[in-house]
Image (cartoon, rainbow, N blue to C red):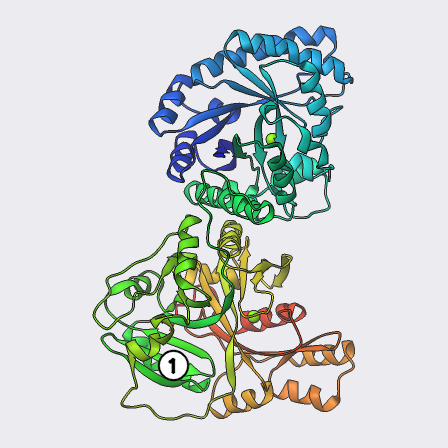
Amino acid sequence: MRMSIATVCLSGGLAEKLEAIADAGFKGVEIFENDLLSFDGTPADVRKMTADLGLEIITFQPFRDFEGLPPERRARAFARAERKFDVMAELGCDLLLVCSNVTEDCLGGIDRAAADLHELGDKAKARGMRIGFEALAWGRHINDYRDAWEAVRRADHPAVGLVLDTFHTLARKTDLSAMRSIPRDRIALVQVADAPAMDMDVLQWSRHFRNFPGQGDLPIIDFMAALDATGYDGLLSLEIFNDQFRAGSARSLAVDGHRSLIYMMDRLRQRTGHAAPDQSPLPPRSPCLGTEFIEFAIESAGIAAFEKALSGLGFLKAGQHVSKAVSRWTQGGINIVLNADTAGFAHAFNITHGTGVCAIGLRVADAKATLARAEGLLDRPFRQAVRPGELDIPAVRGLGGSLVYFVDAADKLGKVWDIEFNPPADAKPVPGAGLTVVDHISQSMHYEEVLTWLLFYTSLLDVGKTAEQDVLDPGGLVKSQVVQSADGAIRIVLNASQSSRTQSSRFLSEAFGSGVQHIAFQTDDIFKTAATLAANGVALLPIPENYYDDLDAKIDLDPALLKKLQAHNVLYDRDGQAEYFQLYTQTFDERFFFEIVERRGYVGFGAPNAQVRLTAQARLARAPGVPRR
Ligand code: MG
Ligand code: MG
């Protein structure tokens, strides 16, 4: 399958779009007419530019409202088509995409449409060109690929083919079985788009919310399996209209697009058992067994305060790196790495972002295979010079320039702590606070980045996504999307907001970019943990009394339990018999905080408490304009 993308998917001017598309490894491009109209140059310039970039212009689109016109408008439509053919000749493109007529005065009848297509096929053929006919989901008479195919079939012309589009087909839940018997050589082009499940007008849904395959909820693989049955091995082209994409970076989006097609073909291979001839099979999505470590990049001046915070949370300094200013802190199955080295990746990260999480180490079944899959998906591997005594741990670039390491138990990687770290001379045993594992990692990002990182995690690891949620911050709405493994061994919360006044957005400006805003640890006994933290002098986020009054009114709680919750500033949620307890530290360095949770069969994230928590945090945050201490 040759992979292509429509210029309409990306932000920027035409030249910028084409460069991004070529750099992302596409071979073909659909030129959207508006991109050409707004381009400061001739179609011949575009032809040269695309050829220089190694791109083929696979289609020029769209040609609208053509078939079924009454006689008085019909001649005009053919004249319009000739003008398009002129442009295509200059562009060096041989396929005109004709989408079904949406106008009121369009006349129905498959035979009429077929006759129009046949005649246009003659005109195209005379110029060595072809036309492809596509059913728009909101077409006046033809809005179903089966009718479009019937019109193409009856047109019975070598220069007239069918264009299939996943969105137009799946948005209307059109039965896919008829697709399987379409002769593959009659399919001129297949356009691919996903979309989130939404209950709205299909035109608005299509124009604003389409996304790359795997980012939405449409059964794309069902469509692809039906297409696969035809033996089609021609062009696959992304055609996405999305408001977030229009605000995003063209380069990053083009890579996302290519990644999404590779991942789609990978899922199709899982379904059908046969691979696309030109794509080497990827290792399977790795199960994620948990978070092995979280690494903070920190300047040496900040170490004492951070170490005090970790001690307060019951962490023990367990190791000092053999050659660098790097220490390891542990508790239960949690490893925190503090990196104050003045060379290397963490240092560079710290200079850009200040104190923050520069890397996450994920426990996977096979680290090397995970890296190979990541590379196959066009993720960016990271390598830095390895000094004697250090391990070369596979890693790729993650959110905001951070790293995602892959650690497995199979070889020396699992012994990283023994090899790279020595027990510190000044180790003082501290009573732990009962923290067991990392429960979830919460990342704040720009609104238009959410789909990028959703695709990054779900294509690479065996994780699923939950429905997107809106969370009310006193500064505005925050969109929250979770990716997690079925067993909860890894849970990553992606947060983004279009308002600049939310905590999520303030984090982005404080930290100079996207990153980890909070980490939640699990405990088996929230009240014991809370008591230890209190004894250690850890400042917790105070929760207002009103919250507990409301909780009492909402949920029939044991008064003793309610009293304990209130005494320890613990938030509570219940889902059936399942219970959730959460408490928060105050914000560290005015941007980062820890959460501690106890889950009793509970699988969510305490969404009903989010607004109370965010408001409590906003109350403590410094007023805008007040300099940091
Ligand atoms: Mg289309
Ligand atoms: Mg949380």
Front position in the image: 42 or 375: 375
Front position in the image: 36 or 408: 408
Position of the C terminus, as image quadrant, is: bottom left
- For the point 37% across and 79% down, which residue is it? 306
Residue 401 makes an appearance in the image: yes
Give the side of residue 86 with respect to residue 580, left or right. left
Residue 68 makes an appearance in the image: no
Cβ of mark 1 under 8 A from ligand 2: no
Give the side of residue 606 with respect to residue 347, left or right. right
Residue, far front:
273
Q: Is residue 93 above or below residue 539?
A: above
Give the side of residue 536 with respect to residue 476, left or right. left
Q: Which residue is mark 1?
A: 329
- For ligand 2, which image quadrant applies? bottom right
Secondary-structure class at tag 1: strand
Badge 1: few (under 14), some or many (20 or more) residues near its Cα, within 10 Å? many
Task: Count the labels in the image.
Answer: 1
- For the point 60% across and 64% down, which residue is it? 474
Q: Is residue 472 above or below residue 152?
A: below
Can you tell which quarter of the image residue 611 is in? Answer: bottom right
Can you tell which quarter of the image residue 227 is in? Answer: top right
Q: Position of residue 159 (x, y in %)?
A: 58, 15
Q: Position of residue 84 (x, y in %)?
A: 53, 14
- For the point 44% across and 40% down, which residue is it? 250
Amino acid of disc 1 = Trp
Q: Position of residue 597 (x, y in %)?
A: 58, 78
Q: Position of residue 131 (x, y in %)?
A: 58, 18
